[in-house]
Image (cartoon, rainbow, N blue to C red):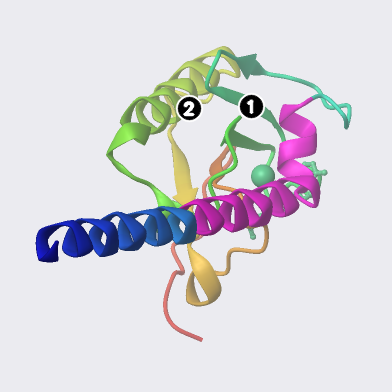
Amino acid sequence: MIFQSFLIIFIYKLINLDLLLFCDIILLTKIIFKQMENCIFCKIANKEIETNILYENNNIIAFPDINPIAPVHVLIIPKKHIASINDLDNYDQKIISDIILAAKKISKDLDISEDGYKLLFRVGKNGGQEIPHIHLHLIGGAKLHEDIRPI
Ligand code: AMP
Ligand code: ZN
C-alpha cells in the first residue's frame, strides 16, 4: 500500500513537471516567433523584403548594407534567427563557417580580396549592435580607419 502511494505521488510529480516543461517550451517558441516576426533581417532572409542577393545557400544570405560606410559594404546573415554571437550554440558551427567562407568568396567576386578588407561582428550594447540578428559586415574597397578604441 505504501509503495503504491509513493508510486502514485511519483507519477503525479512527473506529469506535473512535464506539464511545466511543456508550457516553458510553448512560451519560448512563442517568444522566438514574435522576435522573428519583427526582425528586418528575417524578412530579408524570407524574401519578404527585396534586396540584391550577392550570395545565398541553405544556411545564409548576403546583401549590400543599405547605408554603406565604404565602397564595398556587404552584410552576411544566417537565415535562421539568431540574435547575436552570444546566442550561438554548438549546432550552429556550420552556419558560422558558411558566413566566413561566403565573405571570402564575395570579397573575390567584388575584387577586393587582394587589397584586403575588414570583417566585423558587433555584439550587444558595447559592440554597437543595432539589429538583433547576427550579421557579419564585410567592408572594403578603400583603406579603412583603425579606430576601435573606447568612446
Ligand atoms: P549593426 O550596427 O552591426 O547592427 O549593423 C546594422 C546594419 O544594418 C547597419 O549598417 C545598417 O545600415 C544595416 N541595415 C539596416 N537595415 C537594412 C536593410 N533593410 N537592408 C540592408 N542593410 C540594412
Ligand atoms: Zn531575425
Query: Is residue 65 visible from the viewing direction of this image?
Result: no
On whether residue 25 falls in the magenta region, the answer is yes
Up-down relation of residue 6 to residue 40 (above or below):
below
Q: 64 or 6, which is in the foreground?
A: 6
Against 38, is 45 above or below?
Answer: above
Q: Is residue 29 magenta?
A: yes
Does the numbered disc 2 mark a residue whose Cβ is under 8 Å from ligand 1?
A: no
The residue depicted at 61 percent of the width and 15 percent of the height is 56
Tell me the residue that label 2 is attached to: 103
Work out whether 88 lies above or below 77.
Answer: below
Q: Quick one: SS at disc 2?
A: helix
Residue depicted at 63% across the width and 51% down the height: 32
Residue closer to the observer: 82 or 150:
82
Q: Residue furthest front?
A: 1
Q: What element carries label 1?
A: strand
**Can you give x and y, in whole percent of width and height, for residue 46 in the image?**
76, 26
Which residue range is magenta in the image? Answer: 22-46
Instruction: Give x and y (percent) for residue 61.
Output: 62, 24
Q: How far apart in space, not on screen, are marks 2 and 1 (Cα)? A: 9 Å
Residue furthest left in the image: 3
Q: Whole-percent x and y of residue 150?
A: 44, 83
Q: Residue furthest bottom?
A: 151
Mark 2 or 1, nearer chain start: 1
Q: In this view, does 39 lie to the left or right of 108?
A: right
Q: Tell me the amino acid under the disc marked 1.
A: Ala
Q: In which quarter of the image is residue 119?
A: top left
Instruction: Tell me if the residue at label 1 has its CB under 8 Å from ligand 1.
Output: no
The residue positioned 52% from the left and 21% from the top of the image is 59
| Quarter occupied by the N terminus | bottom left
Determine which residue is flagged by label 1: 62
